[in-house]
Amino acid sequence: MKSFLIIFLFSLSILQIAHAKRGIEEALFTWTDSPSTTLNVIWLVEEDDPTRFAWGKEGETVDRQAKVYRQSFYEKAISFWGIASDVKNARFSLPSLKSANVEACHVQLTGLIPDTVYCVKLGKKEFKARTLPSKRPNRISFVTGGDMMHKPKYHADGVKAMASRSPDFALLGGDLAYANGQDWKRWLDWIEEYADHARTKDGLSIPFVVAIGNHEVIGGYGQTPKEAPLFFNLFPFPEENSATYAINLFDDLSVVVLNSNHTQSVESQTEFLESALWQRKDNKHLFVLYHFPAYGIVKGGLGHSVSQSIRKHWTPIFDKYGLDAAFENDHHIYKRSNLIKGGKVDPSGTLYIGDGAWGVQTRSFPEKDRWYVANASPTRHVIEVVIENDVRTYRAINHQQKVFDEFVDHRDASK
């Protein structure tokens, strides 16, 4: 029995080490500041490995150094599924069987040149990303979605659907790896699939802006940042341990990122939201990104407590400042609302679109008339947003990379 146990645990350790290699030294690019002059570079390394980072402009020698912030990604040992007493009785120690320590690395590159490709080397691997132009071009596109990885294949298929549109960037609305604040191995899979497949047709990595969801948090709702250690250890934010922030992606296009009661209450963000939208009230294109929907269909629909709280505290501010669209997630379906203002259909209102079915098993829902819904489908998808001549076009793209719904908003069209 002892020899069997030793062989079993040794095999388990080999599997853990092999698994830990996935997602290691794979670069993610995010933005929390000016996308024309900065890039956040994020990657994971094993604890004892050196930091091997260099960067430079495409076409030049990639040998520039930068300050690397490095910290533990998690602190957790393997559970032996109820055989711990047998391990103790076997009277041997297997320190190598503890989960290999993984650390999160982060570099913020600043003072970059707008609309320029930069190369990053992590050991022998190389990644490229482009800064945005300082002034919005006539045509830009981005992709948004959330609820990304019930299975790595679903996640990869969603990433490939996004990449097929060659967007300038992505807005990720939470529930990325379904790690529930604890399962670090799922993050390795998520990072691997995103880094490998989230590339435009010319091979550039697709940078993203990220929001928090319930599956980033131990307990899901009504928690504090302490219950989301993996998420906050991996991603940098303007304010430490706060996933509520605003970013100007172009001179007249901004996104406000909110926290739908995961590690910060809905009502506590109203002052920030009011200030952020007031400062951007003259922007031609104004969006918000968050996880749980204000206008959902499943999970109790409009009767859910989080949905009710968002409609009480946030949507009146959306209405006040003429928000163009709110990107919602969580419900594992596709949903596009009518334009809504003051709790009614209104041609001057906000579009609520999304509902989080990037890479999950979708949910069924009863077919019935809902005043706030223009279209809904139990289809895995990403949403492409194209802005051209100040016309906003929203397209739902399925995993076969086909458009299955479209809405065109001409309200700010160039004359």
Image (cartoon, rainbow, N blue to C red):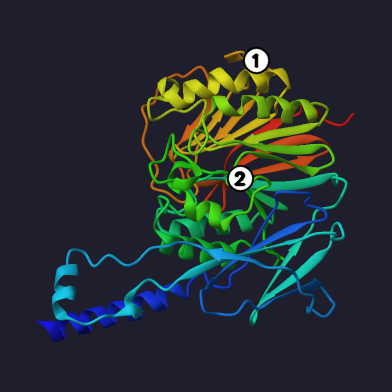
Which image quarter: residue 284? top right
How crowded pointer 1 is (Cα within 10 Å; few <14, some 14-19, many 20+) is rated as few
Image location of residue 189, percent across then percent down: 46, 64
**Residue shown at the point (53%, 63%) measured from the top left:** 191
Name the residue type under label 2.
Thr
Query: From the viewer's perspective, is 45 left or right of 361?
Result: right
In the rendered structure, find residue 144 and report the number of the disc placed on it: 2
Would residue 359 be visible to someone looking at this image?
yes
Would residue 399 be visible to someone looking at this image?
no
Q: Nearer the viewer, residue 87 or 184?
A: 87
Above or below 412: residue 109: below
Query: From the viewer's perspective, is 389 left or right of 378?
Result: right
How crowded pointer 2 is (Cα within 10 Å; few <14, some 14-19, many 20+) is rated as many
**Residue shown at the point (15%, 86%) measured from the top left:** 3
- Dot 2 or dot 1: first in sequence order is 2
Residue at the limit of the structure toward the right, as seen here: 415
Q: Quadrant of the C terminus?
A: top right
**Residue shown at the point (66%, 31%) measured from the top left:** 325
- The local secondary structure at tag 2 comes to strand
Image location of residue 348, percent across then percent down: 71, 18
Q: Which residue is mark 1?
A: 346
- The local secondary structure at tag 1 comes to loop
Query: From the viewer's perspective, is 168 left or right of 94?
Result: right
Q: Nearer the viewer, residue 372 or 12?
A: 12
Image location of residue 39, percent across then percent down: 74, 58
